[in-house]
Image: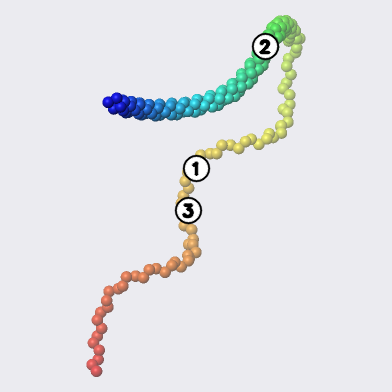
Amino acid sequence: ENMQDLHYHSGYYKNRTSERFETLEARMGSLETEIDTISASINATVNHVQSMYKYINIESTSCHSKLGSHTEELYNLNSSVLVLLNSVDTLRQQYMYLSVRLDMDVRNLSMVMEEMKLVDTKHSQIMKNFTVLKGMPGPPGVRGSKGEMGPVGPVGLTGNKGDKGPTGNRGPLGEKGFIGPKGAPGEPGPPGPKGSQGLKG
């Protein structure tokens, strides 16, 4: 009985061990499948990250180039603004100088006008005195010679269309034309009358 019990227990534990090994192998297979899935996901993630890294590098290069061009444009714009500011300052100084000069010219002109008024008054007085001393006007002078003929003027505008004239005479006959092509054959005519009877033989 001890041998049978030992043999029974040995078979029982052997079966249990075999079942556990099979369970362990199934679990190891499942874990291996899961590991393969995780590894594939990691590889896909790495590829995606690499693609994103390349895309970021391309965009970064593009942004750097655009930033450089924009920086150059801003520099040129600042230079243009500085030139315009200098031009504005120059124009402002010229305006101030011209304003001062204009004021001086207006003052001088006012003084000249006052002097001219005084001179005009003196001339009027002198002309009055001269009119008193002047005699009667003389007779008109001889008429001068005729001047040279001026250049020909430009051509005038075209006039309106005139009325329609009378119908002209009929012209002579033209030359005879070439002979035309032969016409198509006409339709067959009707049958002729029946002939007279012949002589008897």
Secondary structure state at the residue bearing disc 1: loop
For numbered disc 3, what is the local secondary structure? loop
> Which image quadrant is residue 200 in?
bottom left
Q: Which mark is residue 168?
A: 3
SS assignment at label 2: helix
Q: Compare residues 177 and 46 and report the one nearer the observer.
A: 46
Quadrant position of residue 9: top left
Q: Quadrant of residue 33?
A: top left
Q: Residues within 10 Å of mark 2 (few under 14, many from 20)?
A: few
Residue 83 place in picture, x, y as percent? 67, 16
In the rendered image, residue 28, in percent from the top left (x then y), is placed at 40, 27
Residue 107 higher or lower than 43, as above or below: above
The colour scheme used here is rainbow
Per the image, the residue denoted by label 1 is 162
Foreground: 163 or 190? 190
Going from the N terminus, do you reach mark 1 or mark 3 first? Answer: 1
Count of numbered circles on the image: 3
Front position in the image: 70 or 41: 41
Kind of residue at disc 1: Gly
| Residue highlighted by disc 2 | 89
